[in-house]
Image (spheres, coloured by chain):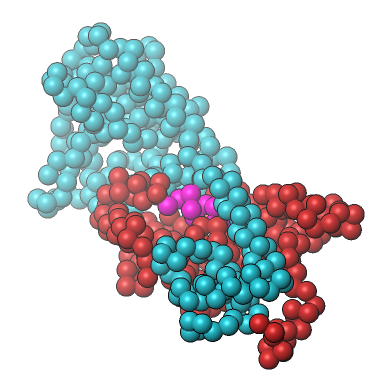
Chain colours: A red, B cyan
Amino acid sequence: MQSVGAITEAAQDNNLLRLTLAGDEEAFTTLYRRRQSAIYRFALQMSGSVVVAEEVTQDVFMTLIHDGTRYDDSRGTVLSFLFGIARNLVLRTLERDRSNRYVSIDNSPAENAETDAMGPLDDLTRRESVDAVRRAVLSLPEAYREVVVLCDLEEVSYADAAVALDCAIGTVRSRLHRGRAMLLEKMKIWKAPAAVQAQFAKPEACLL
Amino acid sequence: MKAGEIMTCREFDTVVAELVRNPIAATSVESDLDASVRSSGAEHAAECAPCGARWIAEERLSASLRALASSSEHKASGAVEVRLLEAFRARQLQAKPSLVVAEAKVVPIRQTKRTPWILAGAIAAAMVLVALLVSVRSGSKGPERTIATQAPRVAPAETSRVAVVTPSQEAAAAPRVVAVRRLTPKRTVSEPRMVATEFVPMERGGFFEPMDRGQLVRVQVPRMAMRNAGFPVREDRLNEPVLADVLVGEDGTARGIRFVKYTQ
């Protein structure tokens, strides 16, 4: 289910794509300007590289020019179609350049050095800095990263994310749940206490 | 979960992210959580200290992610849009093979890391010079020119795929040659035909510099530019847009301009 605003946006995208495929340059330009930043940000948050983000953005719309007729509006929105193309391109690029792209927040010496010296609450402000979040997101496994980037950063609906990622909505939801839990631990915002973990292991023992 | 049921910690764990991401039920149109689950979750967080801490942590995480999202105002550079528009136009030309600029050869959209920036610079230079043509020369009366409509020549078939074109020495040295070419001697009535003026020099001295390579950049300018280039334009149409091809040399300077329109 989508909001009225989202439906209107999707209808406008649909119309722009139809005109684009009919050769309307202005429609293509409008569609590009409406959606390019979302695609760029997705590629940037997934790869951590502005070069990859720029290449992916160009290739996504190049694909739209040449293979835009592949879009099927019964399967999802134009935006989810574009995210799907972007996702495939990003994963291909990451696979190709795997050794250079990964940035692990766990490997940051400064991060680990301060963990022992300062309490988690004292260091919260620094830990919640944008840089730390970015690195934490980048350190997630791809399957969780793409869901977090799409749903939490780009605020794409579960339905659109499912189309873009070619999986079920339930999978999107469970990956998002797991991805967020991993982020909480990586950013040292929260870690399930042993007692709670034990409760999760034995749900019948839960007191509440 | 039914209203009035007590939520367990495990159940809370499965819904806490959803509760935090969509805090207002009325706007969470895609959330499966109904009001009873929301209230049960809130009650559970209030009574269970570890889950209350988890709730707060999830809220902090959401705030951090929002901060990251709002810091990402990045977008692709203007050069990407330029390259895409070139590709789009090339695609349209492929779809209409009878509309061909003669003696052109295909230049790949992505050649090297350097090329797009040169092209972007060339386009920027062309735009500036066109703007100068509109503004600086306004008021001066140039020699009147007419739109040439000479008989079209047949271009070789391999020139039909045009992205960025490279005019020949002949075209550069002889600006009065009309650039109305097509592939086939006969065309159907419904096909649009490109009509173009001769190239008008844009550099001081009034003549093209001999050059090996150049690029044609398609831009849209006010008809005022046509008048300033010496073509007759009615007063009431001076602000109407008209297509123009700017001939840009390898050094990025605009060498000439011609005006284009499509007719049936």
Q: In the picture provided, is B5 more to the left or to the right than B94?
A: right
Q: Do we see residue B161 in this rendering?
A: no
The majority secondary structure of the magenta stretch comes to helix
Picture coordinates of residue B58 (x, y %)? 64, 64
**Quick one: A119 or B154, which is closer to the camera?**
A119
Q: Residue at x 40, y 37 (%)?
A: B166
Q: Which residues are magenta?
A: A35-47
Q: Magenta segment: does it hold A46?
A: yes
Does residue B209 lie above or below B97 as drawn?
A: above
Q: Do we see residue B57 in this rendering?
A: yes
Does residue A27 lie above or below B244 as drawn?
A: below
Picture coordinates of residue B249 (x, y %)? 45, 28
Q: Residue furthest top?
A: B140
Does residue B78 lie above or below B259 as drawn?
A: below
Task: Classify residue B169 by image quadrant.
Answer: top left
Picture coordinates of residue B146 (x, y %)? 16, 22
Q: Magenta segment: does it hold A180?
A: no
Q: In the picture provided, is A81 more to the left or to the right than A72?
A: right
**Quick one: A4 or A66, which is closer to the camera?**
A4
Q: In the picture provided, is A136 more to the left or to the right than A157?
A: right
Task: Classify residue A175 by image quadrant.
Answer: bottom right
Picture coordinates of residue B258 (x, y %)? 28, 28
Q: Residue furthest left?
A: B189
Q: In the picture provided, is A105 more to the left or to the right than B76?
A: right
Q: Residue at x 50, y 27 (%)?
A: B251
Q: Residue at x 79, y 52 (%)?
A: A123
Q: Residue at x 19, y 22 (%)?
A: B238
Quadrant containing the C terminus of chain B in the rendered view? top left
Does residue B156 lie above or below A76 as drawn?
A: above
**Quick one: A94 or B73, which is closer to the camera?**
B73
